[in-house]
């Protein structure tokens, strides 16, 4: 049977991030994608013009509909926005989530829009992170979760990836995309060993959706039965090509190109 992945996340109307990035990425990995939309974000390459939250009952109904009729081999969460949606998601994961769960702790988009309410950060830490196979914070999100400023060096990244592991996820993948003076290096920690995933830094501002694309690719790999280190390795190639061939729509931050690896292949 084709592997199935459910994403519980926000819709990003521009098509680069959120549910749109997830479903495009799932399709590129030959897995069957399903969605439960938590909020609708009206956005373009310059600004987000509105955030419209779904009621908790809507999120629950969407998840029940997919899980009771299709089922899933992996799950992923992205923008959850409110404490109430986080609490409901934790219940849904306990009921249906006996499969790898990838938690992208989406907090603030590259346009500066709040995608997780301030008062919901503690619920994310206490109720969802312990259920996750892997969490995929960027630098700012790592700082926020740890209650201090974002890591600014590779040494601080290594310190933070280890501390984040104590929150209860099996793996922490700390993304170093924000360290612009370094190559694009991400650190995966399993509680014992820190593994590094490295690519060259591509000279572009068009990275909208990179984080969502990366975590969706990891979820697809896990749904196919890959072990974590291989799922991350494959996803790192996938997101690197998506950034290399990013689409500079509009006048601001353009979109990662989810089909890039299929169309252009991997740069040797
Ligand atoms: N300019 C870049 N060149 C190559 N890889 C990048 C670049 N910017 C980010 N990445 C990579 O893209 C992935 C997503 O990271 P990041 O942009 O930090 O996440 P987010 O979108 O959540 O802020 C990571 O693998 C990161 O290393
Ligand atoms: C609806 C929605 N969800 C998540 C994000 C964040 O996406 P991410 O890939 O982490 O980064 P940017 O898209 O902000 O570059 C989002 N923007 N919208």
Image: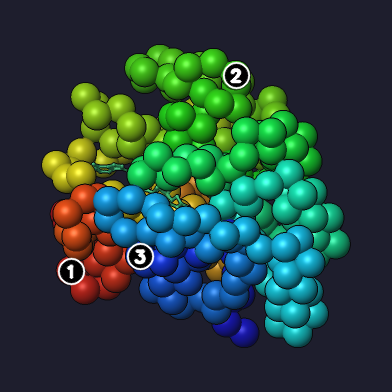
Residue 254 falls left or right of residue 53: left
x, y percent for residue 7: 59, 64
Q: Secondary structure at mark 2?
A: loop
If the picture is divided into quarters, which one holds ligand 1?
top left
Q: Which residue is mark 1?
A: 264
Q: Nearer the viewer, residue 110 or 225?
A: 110
Foreground mark, 1 or 3?
3
Left or right for 203, reference 175? left
For marks 1 and 3, the one nearer the N-term is 3
Distance from Cα at disc 3 to Cα at disc 2: 31 Å
Query: Nearest the camera: 229 or 81?
Result: 81
Give me the residue at 27% from left, 51% from top.
46
Colour basis: rainbow
* Residue at image mark 3: 14
Q: Is mark 2 within 8 Å of ligand 1?
A: no
In the picture, which quadrant includes the C terminus?
bottom left
Label 1, label 3: how many angstroms apart (C-alpha)? 23 Å
Q: Check disc 3 and report its element: helix, strand or loop.
A: loop
| Residue 165 in the image, given as x and y percentages of width and height | 64, 28
* Image quadrant where one finds the N terminus: bottom right
Q: Nearer the viewer, mark 2 or mark 1?
A: 2
The answer to whether 113 appears left or right of 191 in the picture is: left
Vertical comparison of 89 with 35: above or below = above
Q: Secondary structure at mark 1?
A: helix
Could you tell which of marks 2 and 1 lies nearer the N-terminus? 2
Q: At 40% from the left edge and 15% from the top edge, which residue is drawn?
A: 155
The circle drawn on residue 53 is none
Which label lies toward us, 3 or 2? 3
Give the residue at x 21% y 50%.
Answer: 252
Give the label on residue 147, or none: 2
Q: Is residue 90 above or below residue 266?
A: above
């Amino acid at each position: 049977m084709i592997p199935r992945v459910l994403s519980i996340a926000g819709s990003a109307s521009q098509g680069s991030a959120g549910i749109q990035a997830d479903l495009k990425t799932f399709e590129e990995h030959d897995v069957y994608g399903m969605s439960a939309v938590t909020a609708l974000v009206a956005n373009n390459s310059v600004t987000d013009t509105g955030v419209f939250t779904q009621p908790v009952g809507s999120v629950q109904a969407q998840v029940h509909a997919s899980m009771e009729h299709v089922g899933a081999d992996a799950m992923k969460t992205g923008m959850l926005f409110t404490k109430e949606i986080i609490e409901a998601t934790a219940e849904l994961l306990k009921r249906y989530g006996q499969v790898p769960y990838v938690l992208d702790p989406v907090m603030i988009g590259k346009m500066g829009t709040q995608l997780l309410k301030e008062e919901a950060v503690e619920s994310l830490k206490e109720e969802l992170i312990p259920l996750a196979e892997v969490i995929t914070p960027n630098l700012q999100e790592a700082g926020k979760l740890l209650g201090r400023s974002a890591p600014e060096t590779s040494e601080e990244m290594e310190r933070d990836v280890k501390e984040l592991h104590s929150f209860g996820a099996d793996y922490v993948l700390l993304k170093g995309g924000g360290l612009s003076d370094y190559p694009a290096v991400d650190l995966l920690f399993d509680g014992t060993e820190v593994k590094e995933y490295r690519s060259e830094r591509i000279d572009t501002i068009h990275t909208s959706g990179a984080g969502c694309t990366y975590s969706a690719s990891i979820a697809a790999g896990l749904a196919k039965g890959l072990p974590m280190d291989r799922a991350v390795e494959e996803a790192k190639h996938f997101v690197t090509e998506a950034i290399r061939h990013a689409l500079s729509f509009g006048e601001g931050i353009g979109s990662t190109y989810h089909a890039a690896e299929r169309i252009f292949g991997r740069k040797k």
